[in-house]
């Protein structure tokens, strides 16, 4: 193999009399069986042991005649996954990383985020969105949320822009598309780059464009809890900007730059350079070939999974719309095509006669899992310890406060059985009725 491109750590192997193998120690047939047992574990079925013995025998035979996996990281599968991502999302460049937190780190560096710079994001997201700017000593500025979608509100975004704003990070929370026309208009007017955190939005679309491909940067998480995964962890960073795109692979792997060579050396090391000439040091966010294979396999099912999720959300909407005081999720339109990663359950506390916390307790008592995972970020200890003023921030995001404490929670949609879905919808209706009766 002698592909030498970008910053991938690729080198010639296997062609000499004494080759320098890419892989130090190979995996054998017995190891392969263990990998299969991990992916297809014992269900307790009486037939499992017999089927496993058959598979073990077949694998032993296969191992006798097979070759060996000669590249385990940043090889052809990673390249194939990235080419597939470019086609599917309509972006010019894609970079597969060990996780999306790492992918975002590369984008933040390319945007030149450093100490004192301001990054605007919605008050409701996951800590990963702000991990890198926080660690750099940049200032996180929270925009309030749109009460219909709990996504970043473009009007409040504009109010929070200052001369120090260096990046805007909308988050397609729960897979529901952000008002990207609004966000991009504000961003372009002020000349600020946008990164879409589409961790939940993989495969969704806004005005005919795939989520993650609309901003200057965008990307997805392939962590096991997301709609599809790449064997547990993974991320994809997208851009269509040539200046940024050519630096992605270096940003993923320590700045190794095969396009430049210093004398008597295989490569050079380049920094990540922003558009003002500022430089930052790349870390290691490499993803393995096995992760890439996991992604390639699950990508094939992405549209189908979203369709099943959509039907589940429509079912929830159908049942819940019959009960006054429950606000159903915004349905998909020609403009906004969600991924239905989570079901956004909202109530009108006045009509219901109770708040979402009381409802959540009733749902939990009925055996429903509702996830209080996405709330106001300024409530965390780390923010206070870094000198953020929780009360001032809460006052600057009144709708976030009102909605989080009184009117929304998230419910799962997949992979629920028909029976679980029906039970969940009915349980919400019953719990709301109890609250109305003052129980
Ligand atoms: C999961 C998640 C991330 C982080 O993705 P990882 O792949 O786990 O690093 C970022 N933002 C949001 C909104 C997420 O839910």
Image: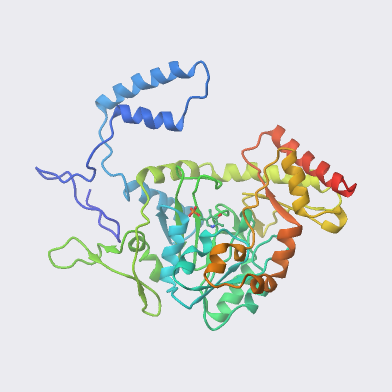
The residue at the far bottom in this view is 163
Q: Residue at x 59, y 42 (%)?
A: 305
Q: Is residue 336 visible?
A: yes
Whether residue 165 is situated above or below residue 323 in the rendered picture: below
Where residue 424 sits, quadrant-wise, is: top right
Q: Residue at x 69, y 54 (%)?
A: 332
Query: Where in the figure is residue 229, as x and y percent of width and height?
Result: 49, 45
190 sits to left or right of 294: right
The residue at the far right in this view is 437
From the viewer's side, name the closer residue of 73 and 118. 118
Q: What colour scheme has been applied to the protein in the rendered image?
A: rainbow
Query: Where in the figure is residue 40, as x and y percent of width and height?
Result: 46, 29
Where residue 23 sits, quadrant-wise, is: top left
Query: Where in the figure is residue 436, as x and y percent of width and height?
Result: 88, 49
286 sits to left or right of 437: left
Q: How many marks?
A: 0
Query: Where in the figure is residue 398, as x and y percent of width and height?
Result: 72, 69
The residue at the far left in this view is 17
Quadrant placement of the C terminus:
top right
Whether residue 90 is situated above or below residue 262 in the rendered picture: above
321 sits to left or right of 215: right
142 sits to left or right of 276: right
Q: Is residue 146 visible?
A: no
From the viewer's side, name the closer residue of 103 and 43. 43
């Amino acid at each position: 193999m002698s592909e030498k491109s970008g910053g991938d750590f690729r080198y010639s192997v296997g062609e000499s009399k004494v080759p320098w193998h890419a892989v130090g120690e190979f995996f054998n047939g017995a190891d392969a069986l263990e990998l299969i047992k991990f992916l297809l574990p014992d269900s307790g079925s009486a037939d499992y042991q017999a089927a496993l013995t058959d598979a073990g025998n077949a694998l032993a035979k296969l191992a006798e005649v097979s070759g060996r996996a000669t590249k385990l990281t940043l090889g052809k599968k990673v390249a194939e996954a990235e080419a597939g991502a470019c086609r599917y999302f309509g972006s010019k460049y894609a970079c597969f990383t060990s996780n999306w937190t790492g992918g975002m780190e590369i984008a933040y560096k390319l945007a030149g985020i450093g100490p004192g710079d301001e990054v605007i994001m919605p008050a409701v997201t996951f800590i990963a969105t702000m991990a890198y700017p926080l660690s750099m000593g940049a200032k996180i500025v929270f925009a309030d949320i749109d009460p219909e979608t709990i996504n970043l509100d473009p009007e409040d975004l504009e109010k929070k822009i200052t001369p120090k704003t260096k990046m805007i990070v909308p988050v397609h929370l729960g897979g529901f598309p952000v008002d990207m026309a609004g966000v991009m208009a504000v961003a372009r007017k002020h000349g600020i780059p946008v990164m879409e955190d589409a961790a939940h939005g993989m495969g969704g679309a806004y005005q005919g464009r795939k989520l993650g491909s609309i901003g200057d940067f965008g990307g997805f998480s392939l962590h096991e809890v997301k709609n599809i995964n790449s064997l547990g962890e993974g991320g994809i960073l997208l851009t269509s900007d040539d200046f940024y795109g050519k630096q992605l692979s270096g940003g993923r792997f320590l700045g190794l730059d095969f396009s430049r060579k210093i004398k008597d050396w295989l490569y050079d090391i380049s920094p990540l350079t922003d558009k003002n000439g500022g430089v930052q040091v790349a870390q290691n966010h490499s993803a393995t070939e096995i992760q890439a294979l996991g992604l390639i396999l699950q990508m094939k099912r992405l549209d189908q999974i979203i369709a099943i999720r959509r039907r589940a959300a429509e079912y929830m909407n159908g049942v819940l719309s019959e009960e006054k005081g429950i606000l159903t999720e915004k349905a998909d339109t020609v403009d906004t095509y969600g991924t239905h990663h989570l079901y956004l359950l909202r109530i009108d506390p006045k009509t219901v006669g109770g708040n979402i916390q009381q409802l959540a307790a009733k749902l939990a008592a009925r055996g429903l899992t509702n996830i209080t995972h996405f709330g106001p970020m300024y409530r965390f200890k780390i923010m206070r310890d870094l000198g953020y003023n929780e009360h001032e921030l809460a006052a600057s995001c009144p709708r976030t406060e009102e909605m989080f404490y009184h009117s929304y929670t998230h419910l799962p949609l997949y992979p629920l059985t028909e029976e679980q879905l029906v039970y969940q919808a009915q349980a919400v209706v019953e719990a709301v009725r109890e609250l109305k009766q003052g129980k």
